[in-house]
Image (spheres, helix red, strand yellow):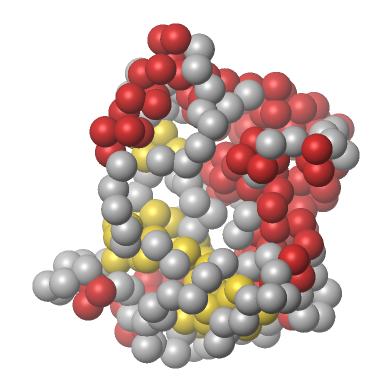
Amino acid sequence: MNIKILLATHKQCDVPKDSIYLPIHVGRALHYDKYFSCQPDDEGENISCKNPYYSELTAIYWAWKNLKSDYIGLVHYRRHFCLKRKGSDWDSILVRKEAESLCKNYDLILPKIRKLYIETVYSHYDHTFDGKQLDNTRLIISDICPEYLSFFDKAMHRRHEHLFNMFIMKRELFNQYCEWLFPILEKLESYYDLKNMDPFQARLIGRVSERLLDVWVMKNNLCYKEIDYIYFGKSNFHKKVLGFIMAKFFGKKYTQSF
């Protein structure tokens, strides 16, 4: 079983030794002054130059157009899938044997849901970023793939979501997902002058895409397995909570990642 899990990174980082992981330098086309010993996302057919807006999606696009494998997944240099704890966090990262077992039994693997509790997916996005971005996405879906519209609405009204664009899925499904996703995002991109936006806000294409994965999964009635993930790095839990409170109750939008 040929599985490749892209490890999206914009800097030198630790990489699991397991051969299922393929570190990929995202946004390489904009940073020729930096060299990492990993696969750049600007070879072959690519959208590497759009990384400031598409984030890790430039790695996904590169894999769609250039990588040949039976299963494709994506993690981040600071977030890794974990099936079960085995002592240290690093030792707990998903390995080939575990991934193969999961792929034999499920259409795709997703990270544990993030529960929003007192917010819906839409209201949380509207309070923290700009709900108009989701409104525009809905208009695009109603125009180019209206069969997904009811599922988009359902996803927006839920109080949980799968985030980070993390997944592992069969190549056939991966192709179908990309064929559906990127035309929507390309159209959404045309609504904004991204080059003249604040860099944090300009990453809206990547943020919206995170909310679209669940739409696609629901519409296609896919059998998926949620597993845990490990975050490597300093946790800013208190800042996250404060940021959420300020956004929901005082109208202060997010201006940075927490």
The percent coordinates of residue 100 (x first, y second) are 40, 80
Nearest to the observer: residue 6 or residue 231: 231
Say which quarter of the image contains residue 201.
Answer: top right
Left or right, 98 with reference to 176: left
The residue positioned 37% from the left and 44% from the top of the image is 113
- The number of discs equals 0
Position of 236 relative to 75 (above/below): above
The percent coordinates of residue 226 (x first, y second) are 36, 55
Left or right, 179 with reference to 129: right
The residue positioned 28% from the left and 38% from the top of the image is 237
| Extreme residue toward the top, this view | 250
Left or right, 8 with reference to 149: left
| Extreme residue toward the front, this view | 33
Nearest to the observer: residue 100 or residue 236: 236
Position of 47 relative to 241 (above/below): below
> Is residue 62 in view from this perspective?
no
The percent coordinates of residue 168 (x first, y second) are 49, 67
Quadrant for the C terminus in the image: top left
The percent coordinates of residue 148 (x first, y second) are 70, 37
The residue positioned 49% from the left and 58% from the top of the image is 166
> Is residue 182 in view from this perspective?
yes
Say which quarter of the image contains residue 49.
Answer: bottom right
The residue positioned 77% from the left and 80% from the top of the image is 43
Nearest to the observer: residue 212 or residue 207: 207
Left or right, 205 with reference to 46: left
